[in-house]
Amino acid sequence: MHCAACGAGGQAVSIAQVLLYNGPALNIPAVICQSCKRLHTMAISIKTPQELEKMRVAGRLAAEVLEMIGPYVQAGVSTGELDRLCHDYIVNVQQAIPAPLNYNGFPKSICTSVNHVVCHGIPSDAKILKKGDIINIDVTVIKDGYHGDTSKMFVIDEVPAHVGRLVEVTKQCLYRAIEIVRPGTRLGDIGHVIQSLAESNHFSVVREYCGHGIGRIFHEDPQVLHFGKPGTGVVLQEGMTFTIEPMLNAGTHHTKLSKSDGWTVTTRDRRLSAQWEHTLAVTSDGVEVLTRRSDEHF
Ligand SMILES: [Co+2]
């Protein structure tokens, strides 16, 4: 990646990532170039075949963490324990790095967002899962310098039908969006597909958090909004890699960022929220789901 301000680039420039807060909680990814020290937003990177191979490896590892943790996600387990299991698996078995740990000060290796927590929930030994809970586990691994980012919902035992529907519709929003990814599709088309399906089911789409470009950097351009108008926004090209990660709320789309920990995002009305996420690569004629799990068929 080259600095958009001074032009320095390549491996020699180490790029520190920061999050700009613009308004209530809109995360704008930006970088400080270590060469010119200036802050700038990023340009969309096109990955080479060699980079895509590394993204494939990182993506598969992230998916495998979600497959590994599944059997442990049960009533009685703490989210702190789930974090330790994932951390140890990533570090010791996969010999990879959990990207969230120490990222802008995040204290744990995964995000665990239970019930009305929208995203960025911090695992804790005090948070014990119980029957009827829903939880999103969000995993990002770094392998050989490249990131793979994916999340899925787990349901603890049985949940009422309306809760199951929130979880299922959110997953379908992700899948429908993935279906239209190919060169020429615009980001507004993706946002529109998600927003239409969500709102036709009387759910709302979270505005303040979005999908993102990904590669050597955890959050890079473009921002992938989960709402929008067809025929607008960035035109997708072969070699782009980004996440789609819709967050749907049962109530209104408004969110609240915890003042006490600076991370946990909840629904303002404390109604439920669900999220699913994959890392994708745009191919010559469609999409490759880099974080596909073995139970999924794209
Ligand atoms: Co992500």
Image (spheres, rainbow, N blue to C red):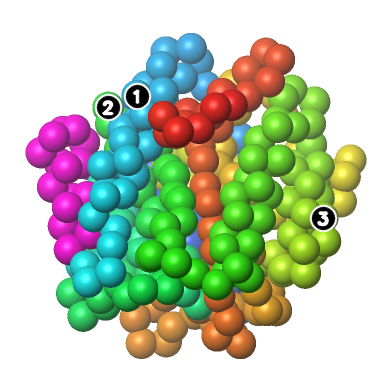
Q: CA distance from mark 2 to mark 3?
A: 38 Å
What residue appears at the point 78 percent right and 54 percent down from the top-left corner? 197
Mark 1 or mark 2: whose residue is earlier in sequence: 1
Q: From the image, tell me which residue sits under label 3.
A: 196
Q: Are marks 2 and 3 in contact (CB under 8 Å)?
A: no
Residue 292 screen position, x and y as percent: 47, 31
- CA neighbours of label 1 inside 10 A, class few (<14), some (14 to 19), many (20+): some
Q: Does residue 244 lie above or below 146 as drawn?
A: below
Determine whether, in the image, residue 258 is placed left or right of residue 233.
left
> Which residue is identified by label 1?
57
Q: Nearer the viewer, residue 252 or 140?
A: 252
Residue 152 at what x, y percent from top left? Answer: 46, 51
Q: Are marks 1 and 2 in contact (CB under 8 Å)?
A: yes
Q: Which residues are magenta?
A: 81-97
Q: CA distance from mark 3 to mark 1?
A: 33 Å
- Between marks 1 and 2, how big is the CA–CA gap? 9 Å
Q: Residue at x 41, y 17 (%)?
A: 53
Question: Residue at the location (52% across, 22% down)?
Answer: 47
What kind of secondary structure does the magenta stretch mostly adopt?
Answer: helix
The residue that disc 2 covers is: 144
Circle 3 or circle 1, nearest the eye: 3
